[in-house]
Amino acid sequence: MAIRVAVSHRTRYVYGRPVAMTPQVIRLRPAPHTRTPIHSYSLRIEPTEHFLNWQQDPYGNYLARVVIPEKTVSFGVTVDLVADLEAFNPFDFFIEPYAEKYPFVYAERVRRELAPFLLAEPASPSQLLSPDLALANKTTGSARKALAGFTWTHETGWSILGETWWDGTAPSAEDWQRLSRQARQRNALAALPGVPAAAVAGSLAASTRMFQQPNVSRHAALAHIAWSDPQGGRWSGGVDLLRSLDDGGYSLTAAVSWQADRLRLDAGVRRFGGKPDSAYRLMPERGIVFAGASLAF
């Protein structure tokens, strides 16, 4: 059952001397698409000598544009409305299939409509389009590096290696989050009219320089398990897990090898994963399958 309420809102300014006022835009009228039924609405302006024009913005919201031709010592706005407060389910909506998992890419039509809202400070459009400013490691601190590890080998052919390191010259988790944010902003920028697509593509390509770092994470750990036939057999294999301790991203690799007298064959698969804004999830690909052969002459 709805509850009918009456709401009155008043704002009034009093000035010490007569002042000339520029046109005022007042946003105090419910939008036509509101779920709350509006039974009556009124807007009163002080002083009484004024011009009032109703407008709508691109999103359907009402705007009252008020022009006061003469100087005045006061300015007031009074709104009265009667509305029904009805209960409704706030979860009465559906999610498009492409948006069921985050991160997602907006459909082209929606992305163009949302383009102004997908641009965020502090990066300006000129910075987003500059290859030189595509992404700088703003949080780079000490150039020191440290490494600690261990190895273990068994006579059955199994071996284990563990390492952890810290590299002050590598990008930080904040740098990778900034790269993810700016990539979304550049994609939004491409939807704006007058923005050259080549400039956006160039800045996106320049931002991949982050992946050329010797280490993509400042603090990481590596676990390596391998097996080779202790009897001198031809087969060997191993599994590597490289994990960023900064953002939780990881790279998982499994590989096998076959060695003859002169011929060597290698094959494997690598998978990148982790949080959406982690370094390894931002890799250009999510997985790699590789194979190779070498022949000794």
Image (cartoon, rainbow, N blue to C red):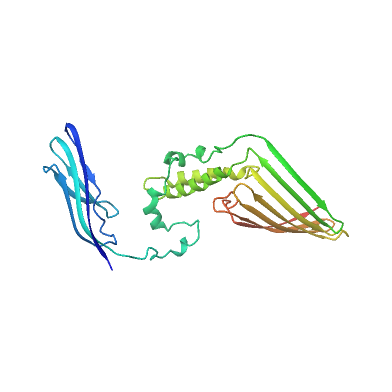
Q: Nearer the viewer, residue 125 or 16?
A: 16
Q: Nearer the viewer, residue 76 or 141?
A: 76
- At x 66% / y 46%, what residue is drawn? 220
Q: Residue furthest left?
A: 49
Which residue is at 16% across, 45% downward? 45
Quadrant in the picture for residue 253: bottom right
Q: Residue furthest right?
A: 231
Q: Which residue: 85% across, 59% down?
A: 156
Question: How many tags in the picture?
Answer: 0
The x and y percentages for residue 170 are 62, 40
Q: Residue furthest top?
A: 17
Name the side, left or right, on which 6 lies relative to 94. left
Quarter holding the N terminus? bottom left
Q: Is residue 120 left or right of residue 230?
A: left
Is residue 246 visible in the rendered image? The answer is yes
Foreground residue, 274 or 77? 77
**Residue 270: image x %, image y %?**
66, 56
Residue found at x 69% / y 43%: 165
Rendered position, 71 above or below 8: above
Q: Position of residue 111 (x, y in %)?
A: 40, 54
Toward the bottom, the furthest residue is 1
Residue 22 shows in this picture: no
Q: Position of residue 66 (x, y in %)?
A: 18, 44
Between residue 161 and residue 289, name the one nearer to us.
161
